[in-house]
């Protein structure tokens, strides 16, 4: 499907690069972009797309935030609809049964930080900037920022970032655990692709099961989370990939995983 603000490239090895492309507005999120993200994620073919990399068009911004010109004159009912649109799209992104890597180039503010946090892993260029500056506009994060940020950096750092609205650089984001790695701008996509290629060497069903355990288990009690892991662990033994992987290991050969 053709999109106005999204560009996607699927490589032969199953790595898909999704680019949010509205460079004139620094890729700011409007209702159309959010709807397109929702549609893309809802319809992605997981039999062909094995790792998704999300990035922004241009060198200045990953996503500079939500579109303030669209939000300014909203009433509370319209704002609720807008928030739900973004939150639902990002939840679908978070719930994809494949790894999702954010390649953060430049500004990732407000909704930009929120979409990055909905990805499994965040790699930032050295010029990347992160923040949740909504309080300076008289609002709060609307796309689940108050939920995901504390999970990544802890409640104290989350409150500091949200209450002050300050913007931090890539190295500070790395220090507090908001991003996994930092590299030069010119190396960003290559680094994300290399990480994706490492993932492709492993069993896709096992990766998907691991993701479900981590995502779903985080909000459970320890007992419930361990029980969930036990279930997914046992399910792996009903797959061809488990048999192939262990047989290859014992015969000192390279495993070939088929996602079955």
Image (cartoon, helix red, strand yellow):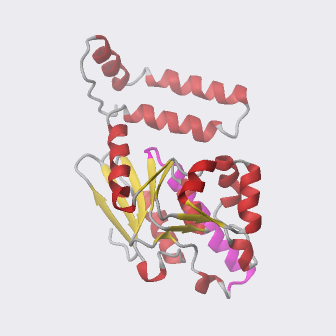
Position in image of residue 22 (x %, y %): 43, 77
Position in image of residue 238 (x %, y %): 42, 22
Q: How many marks?
A: 0
| Identity of the residue drawn at 50% across and 64% down | 128
Predominant SS of the magenta segment? helix
| Identity of the residue drawn at 59% across and 86% down | 69
| Identity of the residue drawn at 57% across and 79% down | 67
Position in image of residue 132 (x %, y %): 66, 66
Q: Nearer the viewer, residue 12 or 112?
A: 112
When asked about the image quadrant of residue 149, the answer is bottom right
Seen in the picture, residue 198 relative to 32 is either above or below; the reply is: above
Q: Nearer the viewer, residue 21 or 33?
A: 21
| Identity of the residue drawn at 63% across and 73% down | 82
When asked about the image quadrant of residue 165, the answer is bottom right
Q: Is residue 60 left or right of residue 118?
A: left
Q: Is residue 251 left or right of residue 205?
A: left
Q: Is residue 126 left or right of residue 74?
A: left
Work out whether residue 142 can be spotted.
no
Work out whether residue 129 can be spotted.
yes
Seen in the picture, residue 231 relative to 37 is either above or below; the reply is: above
Q: Quadrant of the C terminus?
A: top left
Seen in the picture, residue 184 relative to 4 is either above or below; the reply is: above
User: For residue 98: magenta?
Assistant: yes
Residue reaching furthest to the top: 250
Q: Which residues are magenta?
A: 74-99
When asked about the image quadrant of residue 227, the answer is top right
User: For residue 235: magenta?
Assistant: no
Position in image of residue 47 (x %, y %): 32, 45
Q: Quadrant of the N terminus?
A: bottom left
């Amino acid at each position: 499907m053709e999109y106005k603000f999204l560009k996607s490239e699927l490589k032969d090895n199953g790595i898909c690069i999704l680019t949010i492309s509205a460079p004139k507005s620094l890729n700011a999120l409007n209702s159309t972009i959010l709807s397109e993200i929702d549609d893309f994620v809802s319809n992605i073919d997981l039999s062909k797309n094995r790792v998704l990399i999300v990035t922004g068009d241009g060198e200045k911004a990953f996503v500079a935030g939500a579109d303030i010109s669209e939000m300014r004159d909203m009433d509370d009912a319209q704002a609720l609809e807008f928030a739900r649109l973004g939150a639902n799209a990002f939840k679908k992104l978070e719930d994809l049964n494949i790894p999702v890597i954010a390649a953060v180039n430049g500004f990732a503010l407000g909704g930009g930080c929120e979409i990055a946090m909905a990805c499994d892993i965040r790699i930032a260029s050295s010029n990347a900037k992160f923040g949740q500056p909504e309080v300076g506009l008289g609002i709060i994060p609307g796309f689940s920022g108050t939920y995901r940020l504390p999970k990544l950096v802890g409640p104290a750092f989350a409150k500091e970032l949200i209450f002050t609205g300050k913007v931090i650089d890539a190295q500070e984001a790395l220090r507090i655990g908001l991003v996994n790695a930092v590299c030069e701008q010119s190396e960003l996509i290559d680094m994300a692709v290399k990480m994706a290629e490492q993932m492709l060497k492993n069993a896709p069903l096992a990766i998907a099961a691991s993701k479900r355990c981590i995502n779903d288990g985080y909000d459970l009690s320890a007992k419930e989370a361990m029980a969930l892991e036990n279930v997914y662990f046992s399910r792996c033994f009903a797959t061809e990939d488990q048999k192939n992987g262990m047989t290859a290991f014992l015969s000192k050969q390279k495993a070939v995983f088929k996602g079955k």
